[in-house]
Image: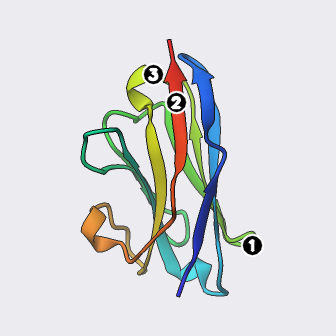
Amino acid sequence: QVQLVESGGGLVQAGGSLRLSCAASGRTFSSYAMGWFRQAPGKEREFVAAISWSAGNTYYADSVKGRFTISRDNAKNTVYLQMTSLKREDTAVYYCAAKRTLGVVTATRQFDYWGQGTQVTVSS
């Protein structure tokens, strides 16, 4: 069982930056692939970024590539999402997710554990 708690969301102006954190419980964090997803009002939850257990592999949605960076610190049981050059369309609730696998997964249905989400609002 893994519990995930996101933090770091907030209100930021377009062009600004935020760093989201996701703290995981449990002693086997390093066995989990992690992902970030987001859901805007009236829209389906969508993939943002994913990272393998060793951080050797990362994947990004085309909409955030070059602006967002996913990373993890297995010693701190934490995964991060550094967001730069934020746009209004990045406004959403951001969720982190975990799946125990040595690979990388990017589909919503593939993840087993989810956090409660943190709101990111980008103003113009």
Q: x%, y% of residue 28?
A: 61, 86
Q: Which residue is mark 1?
A: 75
Q: Determine contact: label 3, label 2, CB under 8 Å.
A: no
* Lower sequence index among marks 2 and 1: 1
The residue shown at (31%, 37%) is: 62
Q: Which residue is mark 3?
A: 87
Q: x%, y% of residue 111?
A: 36, 72
Q: Given the image, on which type of amino acid does mark 2 rest?
A: Thr
Q: CA distance from mark 2 to mark 1?
A: 30 Å
Mark 2 crowdedness (10 Å alpha carbons): few <14, some 14-19, many ≥20: many
Q: CA distance from mark 3 to mark 2?
A: 9 Å
Of discs 2 and 1, which sits in the foreground?
A: 2
Q: CA distance from mark 3 to mark 1?
A: 32 Å
Q: Given the image, on which type of amino acid does mark 3 rest?
A: Lys
Q: x%, y% of residue 13?
A: 59, 17
Vertical comparison of 107 with 120: above or below: below
